[in-house]
């Protein structure tokens, strides 16, 4: 097979916290992302310093009403513009749109006894709008959107009781939307807990009780694994014909040289990366990882029938994000470059984006083949794209040939993987409309086919404009990828 399958899910991916805005409207309360401030000059060599939070820092942010400093609170106002935006996605021919449901719209503090009606209504309207245009929703249940209230009260996912609260939120989602949504994802980039534990799991450095901060992160991770397995079972029970995927940041690492020590160090990096999907796809903790964690004094807090729950409720498919690759070496003097919330050794064969992320289309083919060979279950690329600045010409055009080239070169590699037999369900490019970037909270790091007239401070009309890539992607979808070469 040298073509994309006929029923291939072409589309785009967004997340509630990066587009909706309206952070305290209609009963919604703050999520962890609403307290992430604008950081255009994020020092990635010390990424953790920016993403480890204390109670004091969170409370200060909650009391700070400066909307400019917290861009995710305003997003691109998708909450009020979704109908027009969905119309543009439909014009491109989208078959699927990946969105997330903000936990805080349905359960503002995570502990209400009844869901918030206005929140329920919003997502009903969004899904109805999508379906009326023939676009299927692919819904992430947890995309950096935990209620801040749960972070403060329970130290987020470190507390096992959060499993029950999240399960109840998911049950509401399945009962409410199970007829409209048949494609689901549990945790966005579940592995990101070790890179930004607060946004991924609400873990606060100063609130870990008897556990060290690192142990608290792995405790929280275990609770997320168990929760993902429980809601996978629930989804199958409550939403007939639904498929539940897990989601990994695919961070492919190459040995910088063929020196065996470089290869060995790289192997560990890649094992670490796939540890998360190993648990969710195979239903068991890999013994080697358990040993590696143990050698650092970390234990997985297994309880009761956790192992059985994991084993019996694996994900139906593996979805992943793919933006860049990096190298590894034992040589400490090599130049490093940022990636997606990571830092890696620079690859002399690759170019980088303005944000330092190394552009590597072939690495996507390698990743697809590696993941399919490892798990033998369908894959879904749910994020891929180029975040960069765009210029609007005097006549109001945006000539983003660089974005077309990035996406085209990656899709050609996807096609090669499919022709080898990789079972790929779909491709949703990240940020089909400009949105607030996750790490820096910038809108000027643009990913979209659709430009949004806003700057980093939120100034602008918010008007949507089609970039050159809009027509290009429309044609890719229309021809089912046969125009790529
Ligand atoms: C992924 C996240 O890791 O990367 C998205 O799931 C995020 O939420 C995307 O937006 C790109 O990263 P950034 O920092 O450029 O927005």
Image (cartoon, grey):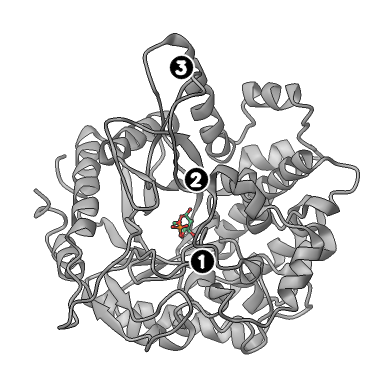
Distance CA(mark 3)–CA(mark 1):
35 Å
Q: Position of residue 398 (x, y in %)?
A: 20, 72
Q: Quadrant of the N terminus?
A: top left
In the image, farthest residue toward the top: 260
Residue 189: percent from left, percent from top: 53, 50
In the figure, is residue 323 to the left or right of 3? right
Q: Is residue 156 above or below residue 331?
A: below
Give me the residue at 12% from left, 52% from top: 484
Query: Residue tagged by mark 2?
Result: 248
- The alpha-carbon separation of the residues under discs 2 and 3 comes to 24 Å
CA–CA distance between discs 2 and 1?
21 Å
Query: Does dot 3 land on a helix, a strand or a loop?
Result: helix
Instruction: Name the residue tied to disc 3.
Output: 262
Q: So how many labels did they put on this image?
A: 3
Name the spot of residue 68 as percent of width and height, x first.
56, 79
Which type of secondary structure does the marked residue at label 1 adopt?
loop
Query: Callout 2: few (<14), some (14-19), or many (20+) C-alpha neighbours within 10 Å?
Result: many
- Give the quadrant of residue 285: top right
Q: Is residue 126 left or right of residue 221?
A: left
Whichever of labels 3 and 1 marks the residue nearer the N terminus, that label is 3
Q: Is residue 146 visible?
A: yes
Q: Nearer the viewer, residue 11 or 68?
A: 68
Q: Nearer the viewer, residue 85 or 47?
A: 47
Report the residue marked by disc 1.
441
> Nearer the N terminus, badge 2 or badge 3?
2
Residues at discs 2 and 1 in contact (Cβ within 8 Å): no
Q: Nearer the viewer, mark 2 or mark 3?
A: 3
Question: Which marked residue is nearer to the observer: mark 2 or mark 1?
Answer: 1
Q: Residue at x 31, y 40 (%)?
A: 364
Residue 336: image x %, image y %?
A: 45, 35
Q: In the image, what residue occupies the spot 44% across and 78% down?
A: 127
């Amino acid at each position: 097979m040298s073509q994309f399958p006929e029923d291939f899910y072409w589309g785009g991916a967004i997340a509630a916290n990066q587009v909706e805005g309206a952070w305290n409207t209609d009963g919604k309360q703050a999520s962890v992302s609403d307290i992430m401030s604008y950081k255009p000059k994020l020092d990635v060599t010390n990424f953790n310093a920016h993403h480890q939070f204390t109670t004091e820092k969170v409370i200060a942010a909650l009391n700070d009403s400066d909307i400019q400093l917290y861009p995710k609170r305003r997003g691109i106002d998708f909450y009020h513009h979704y109908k027009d935006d969905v119309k543009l996605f439909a014009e491109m021919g989208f078959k699927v749109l990946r969105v997330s449901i903000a936990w805080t719209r349905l359960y503002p503090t995570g502990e209400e006894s009844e869901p918030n009606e206005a929140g329920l209504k919003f997502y009903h309207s969004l899904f109805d709008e999508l379906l009326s245009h023939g676009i299927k929703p692919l819904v992430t249940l947890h995309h950096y959107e935990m209620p801040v209230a749960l972070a403060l009260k329970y130290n987020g996912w470190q507390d096992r009781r959060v499993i029950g609260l999240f399960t109840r939120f998911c049950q509401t989602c399945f009962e409410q939307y199970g007829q409209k949504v048949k494609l689901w994802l549990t945790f966005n980039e579940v592995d990101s807990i070790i890179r930004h534990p607060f946004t991924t799991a609400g873990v606060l450095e100063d609130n870990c009780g008897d556990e060290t901060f690192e142990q608290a992160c792995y405790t929280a991770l275990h609770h997320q694994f168990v929760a993902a397995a429980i809601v996978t079972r629930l989804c199958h029970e409550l939403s007939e014909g639904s498929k539940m995927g897990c989601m990994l940041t695919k961070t492919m690492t190459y040995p910088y040289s063929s020196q065996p020590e470089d290869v060995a160090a790289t192997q560990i990096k890649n094992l670490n990366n796939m540890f998360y999907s190993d648990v969710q796809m195979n239903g068991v903790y890999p013994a080697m990882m358990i040993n590696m964690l143990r050698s650092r004094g970390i234990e997985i807090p297994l309880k009761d029938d956790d192992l059985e729950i994991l084993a019996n409720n694996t994900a139906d498919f593996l979805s992943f994000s793919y933006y860049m690759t990096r190298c590894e070496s034992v040589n400490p003097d090599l130049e490093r470059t940022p990636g997606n919330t990571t830092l890696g050794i620079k690859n002399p064969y690759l170019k980088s984006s303005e944000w330092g992320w190394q552009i590597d289309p072939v690495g996507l083919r390698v990743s697809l083949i590696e993941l399919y060979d490892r798990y033998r279950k369908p894959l879904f690329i749910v994020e891929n794209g180029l975040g960069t600045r765009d210029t609007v010409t005097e006549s109001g055009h945006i000539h983003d040939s660089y974005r077309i080239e990035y996406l085209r070169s990656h899709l050609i590699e996807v096609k090669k993987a499919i022709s080898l037999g990789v079972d790929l369900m779909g491709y949703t490019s990240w940020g089909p409309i400009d949105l607030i970037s996750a790490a820096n909270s910038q809108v000027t790091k643009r990913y979209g086919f659709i430009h949004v007239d806003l700057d980093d401070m939120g100034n602008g009309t918010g008007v949507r404009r089609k970039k050159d890539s809009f027509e290009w992607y429309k044609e890719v979808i229309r021809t089912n990828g046969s125009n790529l070469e």
